[in-house]
Image (cartoon, rainbow, N blue to C red):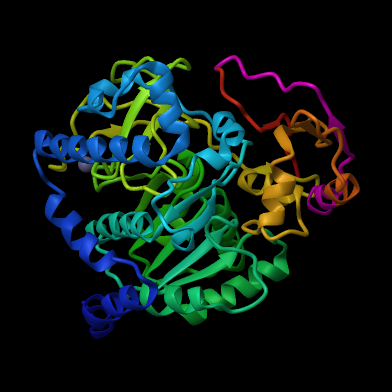
Amino acid sequence: MGLYNIIDRHFLLPVGDLIYGSEIARQWKALRQAEYLPYQQILDIQNEKLRKLVKHAYDSVPYYHKLFDNLGLRPEDIQEKEDLIKIPVLTKQIIRDNYDDMFSSTIDPKRFRKSSSGGSTGTPLQFCTDNHEWSMQRASTLRAWESYGLNLGDRIFSFGGNSIARKKKAFSMKDIYDRVIMRNFKFNSSEVDKDSLKSHLESFKRIRPVAVRGYGSSLVIFARYLKEVGYKPQGIKVVLTTGEVLMTNYRKELEEVFNAPVFDAYGAGDGGIVSHECNCHTGLHITEELCVIEITDKAGNVLPDGEVGFVTTTDLENYAFPFIRYHVGDMSYIKKEPCSCGRHTRQFGEVMGRAGRLLYNKQGVPISPTMLPMMLYPHLDYHCLEYQKEYNKIDRFQIRQDSNGDIQILLKMKEGVNDTAYREEIVENYKRHFVGSEVVLRIVDDIPLLPSGKEDYCVSEYNYKS
Ligand SMILES: [Zn+2]
């Protein structure tokens, strides 16, 4: 460990906590101590947090108060996670319909952190968290990274869409935090033409990163560019992928180009899910101190381990905007076999529902599927309220690319909304990325689900041949 790592961990991070009102240093230490606890002890922690959360939700969140009263339930009826079955699942639609009733009345709105889900399932959601939840998520990520040999203070080159690196105009306080304490240098991957990639490579050389992080598909675009120009990165300890399904061949490519192991992660800010691969690479360990995960059918019945179903989460840390039995929109299963790394937390197998396969335009330029939802409102900042307002008009959407490479954008608008003001702009933006393709936007009444029941927002039959 270098001098900067030591200063960062013991001085900069605690000072950052004081300035930003967070508690990452303290929670990181606590999570480190809990990392190898026997499963029963993890369950005890979970159940204690669950009882507290349910009481809080009943006492201070109008939606849950009404729900419990209607069902004749008392908070005391939920003692442990097996009791959660008594509570119906929470969907994005229910949240939207009851939005104002989802906030806790006991938390000062000034302490809310506005957030939004990535929209990778085609239905983005605006919600709130607070500094505590944010700290817990950061702390559990630091714990995982540390186990890969990455220390706080090691430089990270991040490359991905808005959930990884926002497209932004001005330098902010958050940038100082990211660069000085997290040492995370972020680059938005929405432009991947040769000039942009060249400029990203210049930044990469300047930063001399120890880790690379991003969407698998975005990193593959960058890795292929490095190969093309004959640049061999040196000194990379790990490649961290997140935000979409990591294709097996992309993992191999990334490992080759960066000459480092790839560790995948799956998280959902809405629902408090954090999960990471360990050194065994056999699945994604769920940070069960932070959330209760159930795999259920659509109605909320719990499925046995090994069976694929909806990821249903209860966020044990979000007291501002509680999520209890929330359907994130992804599908997965719990691995039956325990992991040999010594951790007792359960593992997700493959997570489905987050696109990951690259699309190509007619010129062979790859396009990350995770960028597609963000391309619907190119003139708006992804995190701003106006973006959410516009995006919330869309009930669901699907981007279809036919075998000729032409594009159809299907939008199902929310009830009462029969048009989008940005129709032309959306088409123009898609044309800019899918150069040479015909782009048609259609407002439709419904978008059929795939046979798997999955809501796939991106379907491509196009195989680019040079
Ligand atoms: Zn493990």
In the image, is 257 to the left or to the right of 227? Answer: left
Comparing 372 with 211, the one in front is: 372
In the image, is 69 to the left or to the right of 347? Answer: right
Tell me which residue sits at (23%, 27%) in the image.
Answer: 76
Comparing 163 with 213, the one in front is: 163
Question: In the image, is residue 282 above or below residue 185?
Answer: above
In the rendered image, residue 386 lying in the magenta stretch gets the answer no
Q: Position of residue 78 (x, y in %)?
A: 25, 26
Tell me which residue sits at (31%, 55%) in the image.
Answer: 136
Question: In the image, is residue 312 above or below residue 365?
Answer: above
Which region of the structure is painted magenta? Answer: 429-452
Tell me which residue sits at (55%, 53%) in the image.
Answer: 220
Q: Quadrant of the N terminus?
A: bottom left
Tell me which residue sits at (29%, 16%) in the image.
Answer: 304
Q: Position of residue 374 (x, y in %)?
A: 68, 50
In the image, is 402 to the left or to the right of 115? Answer: right
Q: Give the quarter the ligand 1 occupies.
A: top left
Res 419 visible: yes
In the image, is 348 to the left or to the right of 228? Answer: left
Q: Quadrant of the C terminus?
A: top right
In the rendered image, residue 436 lying in the magenta stretch gets the answer yes
Q: Position of residue 271 (x, y in %)?
A: 42, 40
Res 283 visible: no
Q: Quadrant of the rendered structure where residue 423 is?
A: top right
Q: Quadrant of the rendered structure where residue 68 is?
A: top left
